[in-house]
Each structure stands twice: as structure tokens, then as C-alpha cells.
Amino acid sequence: MAKKTVASLQTSSKRLTKAIKMVKSPKSGAYTFQESVMTPEDVNAWLAK
């Protein structure tokens, strides 16, 4: 299960996007959130992992 935030971060000349993904722990079954700031082109590949 993945969730993509729409917030775009703009720093000088580079455009960055913050993506948040829910990951289920195989041990406990609890969900944790992984956050990453990357270019918009890399978001779909990161969420597919």
C-alpha cells in the first residue's frame, strides 16, 4: 500500500517532491511510514519497490 503526497518542494533551481510510503513489518504486522525527498521522475519507481 502506497501513498503519494502532492507537496512539491522547490529549492533554488531544483524541483523536489516528498513521497511517503506505508510499509508493513513482516515481524509484527504493524505499518511504518518511509519518507523520501526526490525528483518527480523517481517517485513512481520508488513507490513500486
Image (cartoon, rainbow, N blue to C red):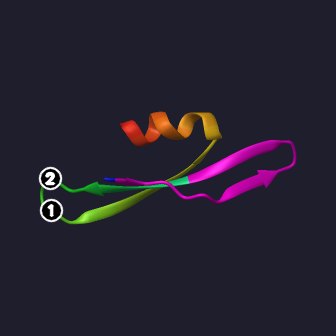
Q: Does the magenta stretch include residue 13?
A: yes
Which span is picked out in magenta? 2-18
Residue at 12% across, 57% down: 27
Q: Mark 1 points at which residue?
A: 29
Tell me where residue 5 appears, x and y as whole percent. Answer: 54, 58
Residue at 53% across, 41% down: 43
Q: Residue 38 carries which label?
A: none
Most prominent secondary structure in the magenta stretch? Answer: strand
Q: Name the residue under label 2.
A: 26
| Left or right of 21, for residue 17 | right
- Per the image, label 1 sits on a secondary structure element best described as loop
User: Which amino acid lies under the numbered mark 2 shown in the image of this protein?
Assistant: Pro
| Left or right of 27, for residue 13 | right
User: Which amino acid lies under the numbered mark 1 shown in the image of this protein?
Assistant: Gly
- Per the image, label 2 sits on a secondary structure element best described as loop
Q: Nearer the viewer, residue 42 or 26?
A: 42
Residue at 23% across, 56% down: 24
Q: In this view, does 21 lie above or below 48?
A: below
